Image (cartoon, rainbow, N blue to C red):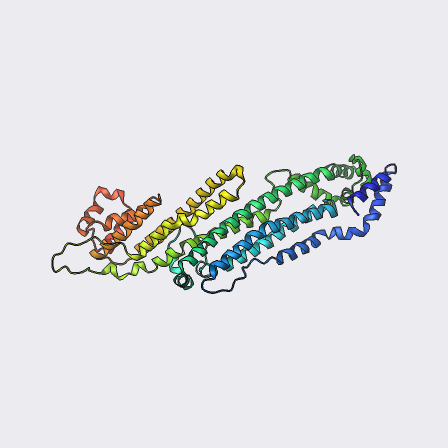
Amino acid sequence: MTGAFARNINHLFAVADITVLANTLRALYSPYESYKQRYGELEHAILLTEIASLDLRGAVPRGVGAQGVELSETVRRMEESIPQVTVLLEAAIERCISFTGGSEAEALIRTLDDTMLQYLALLHETLKSLRSVCGIDHSAHSEPVGMRKEAGSDKKEGMHGGNLLDMVSDEEEWSIVQGALQLLTVADGLSSRSSVFEASLRATLARLNTTLQISSVHANVSQANASGIDVTGSEELSKAGSPRLDMAALRLTDAPEKARRLSNLLEQARDPRFHALPHTSQRVGAFSNAVNELVYEVLILKVRQRLKDVSRMAIWMSAGEDNAFSLPSFSAYPQPYVTSIGEYLLTLPQQLEPLVLDAGTTGLNTNAEANTDEAQFFATEWMFKVAEGATALYIEQLRGIQSLSDHGAQQLSADIEYLCNVLSALSMPIPPVLATFQTCLATSREQLRELVKSDAVSQLDLPTARLICKIRHVTLD
């Protein structure tokens, strides 16, 4: 029963009464009517079967040295699945128009939305499974990571992440970070593809509004019902001025309530603000947020491990070495924990560089420069997020120090000065709290009391300055 067959029937019955033609079409298509009424159910089963067949997990044995390979393979499959699912959804639209003439557009939209929700649930589960591959304990973060709210978060870090960092090589660690960063490409591709598909779906619905002429038929039916006139569907099609009798339109005139709902839907679809897949757009945003959270946790993981228990280091209470021979004292050097963090932060631009290069090579030639600029801004934004997070974690450790000797204050001052130099090299502003630590620790205990009581304290973070006085045993009374 093709469209050509229907057109031939219209041509053969061109001189016949429209009622005769309508009854003939009803008789010819009646064997298919029950299947059309179940279109949504049948389409739903087809699409869910296709979604269930997607294999997103990388087929790589678990073990030391394999995490980066497994992550890369899984991310590749996730990225490739996006156009595959888009093709499936586009095929569903074609089937709906071919089989029902668009009269089951309501069922189609519900089915597409639910299918996308199932696909997004699969992506979420895959993303969740990647936490252990990336070295992040599942129970380490029960709350979404606030990229600037790091207070106490280091205390929740599980042992799994620390063990992974100790076991894998630098090359493997680089591979894990690069794999995690590619998840950003997956999230961006999903967002753009879903937006384009939804716009295409709206355009299809708008064309159906013209093809089916539902608004005209529905208006005539409503007017006839208001007048108490019993009008047949074939008569209404004649009043609508249809040049030929369309089976989809005929089905709708036989089901006025369905025609009314479909008419309202197609009218709404003409509005550019209309969301054809309302639940999908929300869940796509949630997936992007989950990706950002995971990427951030991967990028900040090394910093968390290096800062673990810094507040309880014994050197803060040490008295320093006795100088029995009056030898000149030398400035303290930054300790390994902070130099390791600094070196990692300085490599972030290099870590993020592939994102910029991919944007320049995968974009259209006319937009390659714009894509590169946008990616450069994106990479810089991520660098700032990680640097800000590292600084917040460090400040939290500094606030946890219970007591400082003069030697400990000198050493901590050198550590903070090093990190401040790294932040400056990254064009990052020095947070007022960190600057206050630096100033107050570089000041002798005798001068610190005067500093806090002077007008110069307005340049400092006063609560932090008072805390430093407390841990350095400087009384302000």
> In this rendering, would 205 be left or right of 295?
right
Can residue 398 be spotted in the picture?
yes
Q: Position of residue 424 (x, y in %)?
A: 32, 45
Q: Decide which of 305, 215 is in the foreground and name it.
A: 305
Give the quadrant of residue 78: bottom right
Q: Decide which of 173, 101 is in the foreground and name it.
A: 173
Q: Position of residue 166 (x, y in %)?
A: 38, 62
> In this rendering, would 47 be left or right of 224?
left
> In this rendering, would 155 be left or right of 193?
left
Q: Name which residue lies at 36% across and 54% down.
A: 393
Give the quadrant of residue 77: bottom right
Hey, which residue is sitting farthest left in the picture?
325
Q: Name which residue lies at 12% across and 60% down.
A: 324
Tag count:
0
Can residue 433 be spotted in the picture?
no
Q: Position of residue 256 (x, y in %)?
A: 75, 43
Q: Decide which of 344, 239 is in the foreground and name it.
A: 344
Q: Position of residue 87 (x, y in %)?
A: 63, 49
Q: Is residue 314 above or below residue 146?
A: below
Give the quadrant of residue 161: bottom left
Hey, which residue is sitting farthest right in the picture?
16
